[in-house]
Every structure is written in structure tokens, then in C-alpha cells.
Amino acid sequence: MNYTELQVTTNFSFLRGGSHPEEMVEQALELGYKTIAITDRNTLAGVVRAYTAAKGKDIRIIPACRLDLVDGPSLLAYPTNKDAYARLSALLSLGNLRAEKGDCILYKADVFEHAEGMLFIAIPPDILNIAFNLDPSFKGHLLEYKHHLDKSLNLAANRSYQANDAKRLFRLAELADELRIPLVATNDVHYHAAERRELQDIVTCIREKCTIYNAGFKLHQNAERFLKPIEEMHRLFKKYPAALERTQTIADTCQFCLSELKYVYPEEITSEGRTPQEELIHLAWKGAKDFYGEPLPQKVVTAIEHELKFVDEMNYAPYFLTVYDIVKFAREQGILCQGRGSAANSTICFVLGITSVDPTKFDLLFERFISSARNEPPDIDVDFEHERREEVIQYIYNKYGRDRAAIVATVTQLHQKGAVRDVAKAMGMSLDSINKLSNSVWEFTDEWFEGSRISGEGFNPKDPHLVKVLELTQEYMGFPRQLGQHTGGFVITQGKITDLCPILNARMENRTNIEWNKDDIDALGFLKIDVLALGMLTCIRKGFDLAKQHYGLNLTLANIPQDDPEVYEMISHADTIGVFQIESRAQQSMLPRLRPKNFYDLVIEVALVRPGPIQGDMVHPYLRRRNGEEAIEYPSQELKEILGRTLGVPLFQEQAMKIAIVAAGFTPAEADELRRSMATFKLKGMVSRFGEKLITGMVERGYTEEFAKRVFKQLEGFGSYGFPESHAA
């Protein structure tokens, strides 16, 4: 028995679908589907989620969408190949850019213009008139569609268990025969399982701004719009076997997969006919000579050669050059900027002027920045003065054009407070009850959902209406509510960006977004450049201006005198209000105890006042050793080299990686995996997976089991908060 579900609405049709794309895929797998299509309304925002959920499993996703038109019945559109997908994406972009954010204005003529290589299914009206006939205007529209779309047009038929189902289906079959348009069975799926119908009703009420008590005909009549077993679809369409077969024909024709999308980097970033790699080599050695003079220190030469070789293997040169070009523009305009985060592990980033931290000086680990094991593109975040960042953003738009550069989206997801307010309102609760209920939210705990926390607010936790509100809130949390704009993550391409993904207007003037967020573009291997804003850089710029005005000093980030003892004396007295990174109360209470004397002391200071080191019991041992109250011991010379600067206490992720490599025999790639498991709260508990390997490896190399366990306990204490040395620097 074969059948492909070709009409699936997920919760990325905002406030219409009642299930996540991933839930649709899981349910389809369970029911034995080999292929399903995701057809959200005027958007491709959810298809990457479905594609990622299906990856490596026995199911295929057809990227498609439902086109709601201003001047005709809706059409489901299915690209059969990569070119057709690009046309569908361009069509959606056209509709998006005509409208304000959140809307898409499309006409029949637009569809006819972009139709090549696509298959279409026309969606008939839901109801028949009193004489059990279809709306006559629908037939007129179908004739026009047939004229323009010819053999690529089909007609949808579904069984939704309404009183006139059989008659409606008969009329549709008649019309399909008369106009020679194939009839296709669909189920107009809006949620993965029947029990999700209640939540789908709630999102309808939220969309229509009504309550469940007065929604009436705005709701679906029953709970039949779930993903049905294939046998059930065959039973429902027993009299129309050709309509079932047609689903397979369409699925077999639509072989396009998102994995075919290949990201190509822009070419404007090289000079004098060099390839991107040659250009990067040229700029790296030139920058190194400018920084260090000649001859270059051997450590620098080794680091640059190692990094250039790796960048060449991974073909990342264009990425580095694009970031360099943006930073160069900012410097030419006198805009302060500074690369942040793990880019400080890269000597190339330092000699190109992208970051101001010399990794050879601090012995930072390049693999913390990019590693072959992750097979992920590098991610360089650059901060610019917050008052002038817009100049940099407009430079990118002007250089590459809006058809080739856009900011990635963020998917605004519902958190507990927002979810409970939406659901309670739709369930008809009074405003003061809603306020009380949402104010009782304190954290994501079972206690709250079980009602034991809310009885204190005067609610009866056994009240069935309230129990239902809490149940629905729990299901609704995490639903996407809208597409927002990322703070500054740019995707820049060689070809049109619409070949990869639709573009839409942002709320802000002169800004355009793509429909996918950071995780989606990561899943497809697109590169992103973060152009971020930092208020402190504006403060520093104003400080430079004042120093020049009053004292005639020409200061820059690079030439400010380093390690001035008077400055460190002030810092040791916690006189740091307005000093970036060391002005919080926690920092101010630590400064007199640590008494920093140089820049590296500050690196340690910033890393110490974090939940990770505190939980891992690293703060007090470090302070005792620093104050001479505790002996500094190193179990081996190789660990002394790694932990020497932090007095034998592992404070940084890079140190954890080096210990794993040197003392436990991890490969750099495995060490990076260990680091990732420490660095992300999503993978909580994964650190322990490496525990056995780490302890066994250390014991085999002559360390005591007690010491190995202590090291592991410290690494585990990093939990979600282990701090990278490069970030601290």
C-alpha cells in the first residue's frame, strides 16, 4: 500500500499548525511513510527542521509550500529540481518584499511566471453550496490555472468527516474528469496526532483573537486533520484509487533534496588575480611582518603555516577574506572594532587585524576555533561601535547587493510566561487571573505544572479548567511564534541568495532577512559572519577623542600602554566602575583578593568569576596558591607546562582539551568533542560519557586514579559554563 502525504502544515505556518516539523517526521516514520511533503503557508521556514529530523532515516522530505494568492484559490507548489526550487524561493521573496514583515502578497500572474519545473495542486473551497455544487468561480479559476500550468496542475481532494464529504468528493471527481486535471488524495494535516487537536484549536483562537467559547466556525469541525495511517487513507479513498496513485507519481517526480543546495562564497574579495588562498597567504605574511618585524619568531611562523594549511584543506580562505574586508572598511572609516570569542585562538585572525589577542603569546589552541572533527564552518564574531555599526551593515548590503546579502532570522519561541498568557486568554480566563497565573511562573519545573506552586496564588490546582490550561501550556511552550531578525549574522553568497532561501523584509528600515535561523544554515553548511554592536567600543572611542582633545594623545586599541602599574593599583582596589568586564559586584569583590598585576591576571580574573570554576571548586585552591597558603604541585612535567600559568588549577576549556590530549591520549578532535560537551547546555550530562575514557587513559599513562578522578570532577564542574581562555583574553 503506497501513499504520500502531500499537504502538511507545521507550526511554522504561524498560529495554524499544531505540531513541530520534527514531530511530523517522527510520526510519519512510525506510520511507515517513505516520503512526506512539508507545505507551510507562503514560507519555507520549517523545511530545514524536517529535513534535519529525517536525515539518516528511512524517510524523504519534499520541500514545498502552500501559496495563498490574493486573486485565486490556494496552490500547493512542489519543486521537482534545484532550478525549480530556486524559482519557488524567488517567488516567495517577491511576495515577501512587497509586504510588511509577516505578510506575503502573491498573485496568479506571479505563479505563472515562476512555474517552470514545479508541480501544483489546487485547493478547492471547504464547503459546497445548498445544492451540493462547488462555487462556480472555482471552476473558472481552475480553467485559468489549467491554461497556464497545463500538465503540472492537479486537484486536491480530502475526507474531513463532514456531513457532505461523499457528495463533495464526487463533485470534485466530476470536475477533475471534465477539465482533465488529475485528482490527488490529501489529508490537509495540521497536527501529527489526533490528541493535538485541542492545541490546534487554541492556536486558532490566538490567531483570530477570540476565546474557545466564541470561536464557532473558525475552528476545524473535528480532530481528523492528523497524520493518518496509510491503510486508513486507502480505506477513505477506496472509490478513488487513482487519487492515491497520483500521490506516488508526484512524490517520484519531486526528487529535489535540500542537500543539493551548495553555498558558494563571493569572489570580490581577492586582488591582482590571486585565488582566495593565495590572497590570504599574501595578507597573512604581510600582516605578520607588520606586527612582529623581521625575522619572524619561529613560534609565529609555525602557527601561521599550520593554520594556512588547515584553511586550504577546508577551503575557508574566502571566509577569512570577507571578515578581513569588513574589518578593513571599519578601520578606514575610523570605526573601532574587535573580533570576539574563539577567533582569538587564530594567529591568522591576529595578523589580519581581526582580533587584538596574540594567540602565540598566550599559547591558545587553534583547534578550539575550528577543527576538522566538527566539520563546521568557522564562526568569527566582530564587535563594532554600537553607534556606527549600521554603516558597516549598509556597506555589506551595498558591496554585495540585497539579492546576495541578508541577515539570518531568529525564530522567536514561546517561553513559559508568554505561553501561559496566550493559552489562558484563549481559554477564556479573566485578565487578573491571567496576570496572577503568569506571575506565579518561576522556573521550568514539574512542580509548577502539577499546580503545587500555584495554589499559593489562590488557584485550585485540581480545577479541571486550570489543569487543561497548564497541560496545553506545556505542549505550546517552544512553539515558534514569529521570525525575528538576528542581531547581525550575515549570509553573503556568490549567486542570488534566493537560490538558497526566501528573503523577507525586517521591521527595521533598510534591512532584509532570510527565513532560516542560525541552526538551519549550520545544518546546510552555509557560512555566517556576525557583525555585532558593543556599547563599550563607543565609550572607548569617546575616551580616545577626549584624550586627544585635552592631552594631545593619539591613542588606538593597539598602542595604549600595557601593564601600567598605577592602573593595576586602581583595579586591585576595585575602583572599576565603568571598566568593561570587571565592574560587576562579583568582580569587584574578587579584585582585592586576587590583586591583578598584569593583563594575564585579568584573563584569569574574568574566567574565575563564572559559575563553572565556582561549581568545579577551582576558585579557592587558585587563590590559596596565589597567596602562598597552599603548595603548588604538578603530577608531571607535561601537566606543569599546561597548568603552570594557572598554578596547577585547570580553569579554561583549552587546558581541559590539552590535558585530555597529553595525559589521557585523546586526539585533538576527541578533545574538541569533550570541550563541546562541556560548552553546551543542550548536551547536559554528556561530559560523563568521556569520564571513563579520560580516567582510564590517565591511569594507563602513570597518573593515580585519585588524581584522574579529581581532574575529571573539575572538568565536570565546568558543566555548562567552562570558559574558553580565548574568550577571557
Image (tube, grey):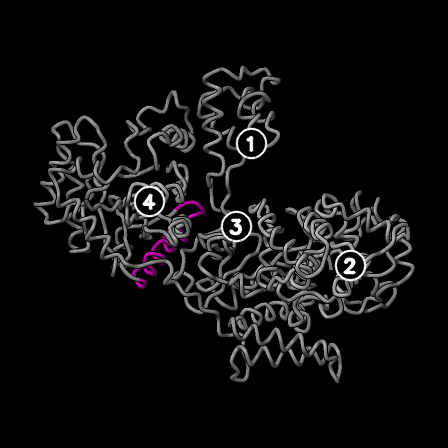
- Contact between labelled residues 3 and 4, with CB atoms less than 8 Å apart: no
Callout 4: helix, strand or loop? helix
Q: Pointer 2: what residue?
A: 635
Q: Which numbered disc, 4 or 2, marks the residue that appears first in the sequence? A: 4
Dot in front, 1 or 2: 2
Q: Categorize mark 4 by other alpha carbons within 10 Å: few (<14), some (14-19), many (20+).
A: some
Q: Quadrant of residue 188?
A: top left
Q: Is residue 97 magenta?
A: yes
Cα–Cα span, label 2 and label 3: 50 Å
Q: Pointer 1: what residue?
A: 417
Q: Is residue 492 above or below residue 652?
A: below
Relative image position of residue 246 (x, y in whole percent)? 17, 49
Cα–Cα span, label 1 and label 2: 51 Å
Which residue type carries mark 2?
A: Pro
Which residues fall within the magenta stretch? Answer: 82-103
Give the residue at x 32% y 52%.
Answer: 60
- Label at residue 485: 3
Q: Pointer 4: what residue?
A: 29
